[in-house]
Image: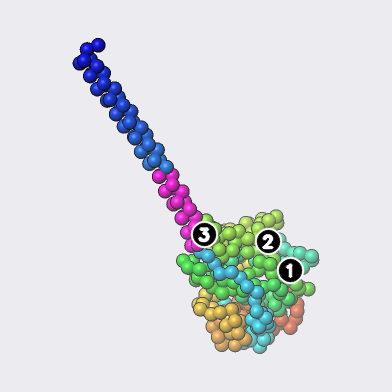
């Protein structure tokens, strides 16, 4: 082989070696780019998950203090009578449905959620009204969901884990979700099942309610129901649990007119279920005024 041939072979070998090195570098760059993209996607997902868990981290519930509980459950009879209907609105609507009972007693069924500000409003008069027929236990003080939800951090109580005993009626309260989010969704709490689920699905749709699936939803023995809050939130906005409970005894306060007025309306509906018992409650002037307003 001549000198020129050997030189040409060497040049070709060097060229092939350089091409191989360039191909290896290209493959490494592509692989590195793919890894970088995967890492960025994982980081983005982690950040999104962390932000989703924090975008509505509601306040934790605590046991309702005894002083507040006492004022909430022992509103003076004179206050009920002076308030009458008060500023209650969205009054119960009669429905043509089978009666609902438990252990031979008429049932009141509530469905709501801890995050819901309108549910937060409605629980106050529910507790006040039912306190005239029985005894509450294990009511926790809590709040609706924080901003950006409507009426953020509305103070209220929760029916999750609470019990109500009465010789006149039975109460079931469902809180279907908490006020805390996980991955952008409020976490589930109480589950509605069986006949109660059927009841809720059938009578929380048109023509019984304006907006299907609305909460809070309150059914009085299968004879009437309320969907939504029964008074405007500004009656309790900016107040603490203790301040709300303390204001109930004074019939001139906006808080009392809203909550006690709504409680009189609820009481009038319950009295229809209990054959007007207890008589001292069902024949009181506040309740009879509420009953007349419902008709």
Q: Majority secondary structure of the magenta segment?
A: helix
Earlier sequence position, callout 2 versus callout 1: 2
Q: Secondary structure at mark 3?
A: helix
**Residue 251: x percent and y percent?**
59, 87
| Quadrant where the N terminus is found in the figure | top left
Horizontal side, residue 295 vs residue 7: left or right: right
- Residue 4 in sight in this render: yes
* Closer mark to the observer between disc 2 and disc 1: 1
**Residue 98: x percent and y percent?**
71, 61
Tag on residue 230? none
Q: Secondary structure at mark 2?
A: loop
Q: Quadrant of residue 116?
A: bottom right
Tag on residue 97? 2
Query: How many numbered markers are drawn?
Result: 3
In the figure, 166 relative to 208: above or below? below
Tag on residue 170? 1
* Closer mark to the observer between disc 3 and disc 1: 3
Q: What's the residue at 72%, 63% (across, down)?
A: 100
| Quadrant where the C terminus is found in the figure | bottom right
Q: What's the residue at 66%, 83% (across, down)?
A: 67
Queried whether the magenta region covers residue 162, the answer comes back as: no
Closer-to-camera residue (32/239): 32
Horizontal side, residue 282 vs residue 214: left or right: right
Q: Which residues are magenta?
A: 36-55
User: For the view shown, which residue lies furthest in the left direction?
Assistant: 4
Give me the C-alpha separation between circle 2 and circle 1.
18 Å
Q: Residues within 10 Å of mark 2 (few under 14, many from 20)?
A: few
Earlier sequence position, callout 3 versus callout 2: 3
**Residue 230: x percent and y percent?**
57, 73
């Amino acid at each position: 082989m001549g000198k020129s041939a050997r030189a040409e072979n060497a040049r070709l070998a060097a060229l092939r070696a350089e091409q191989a090195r360039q191909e290896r570098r290209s493959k490494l760059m592509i692989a590195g780019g793919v890894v970088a993209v995967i890492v960025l996607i994982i980081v983005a997902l982690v950040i999104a998950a962390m932000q989703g868990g924090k975008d509505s981290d509601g306040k934790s519930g605590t046991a309702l203090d005894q002083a507040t509980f006492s004022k909430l459950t022992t509103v003076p009879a004179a206050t009920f009578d002076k308030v009458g209907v008060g500023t209650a609105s969205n009054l119960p609507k009669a429905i043509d449905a089978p009666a609902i009972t438990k252990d031979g007693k008429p049932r009141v069924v509530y469905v709501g959620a801890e995050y819901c500000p309108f549910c937060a409003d409605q629980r106050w008069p529910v507790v006040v009204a039912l306190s005239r027929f029985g005894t509450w236990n294990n009511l926790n003080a809590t709040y609706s969901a924080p901003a950006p939800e409507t009426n953020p951090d509305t103070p209220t109580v929760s029916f999750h884990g609470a019990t109500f005993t009465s010789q006149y009626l039975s109460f079931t309260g469902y809180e279907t979700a908490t006020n805390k989010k996980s991955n952008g969704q409020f976490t589930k709490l109480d589950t509605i099942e069986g006949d109660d689920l059927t009841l809720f699905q059938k009578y929380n749709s048109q023509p019984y309610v304006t907006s299907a699936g609305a909460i809070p939803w309150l059914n009085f023995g299968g004879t009437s129901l309320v969907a939504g809050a029964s008074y405007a939130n500004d009656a309790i906005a900016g107040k603490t649990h203790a301040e709300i409970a303390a204001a109930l005894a004074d019939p001139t306060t906006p808080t009392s007119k809203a909550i006690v007025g709504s409680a009189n309306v609820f009481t009038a509906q319950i009295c229809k279920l209990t054959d007007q018992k207890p008589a001292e409650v069902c024949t009181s002037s506040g309740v009879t005024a509420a009953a007349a307003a419902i008709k």
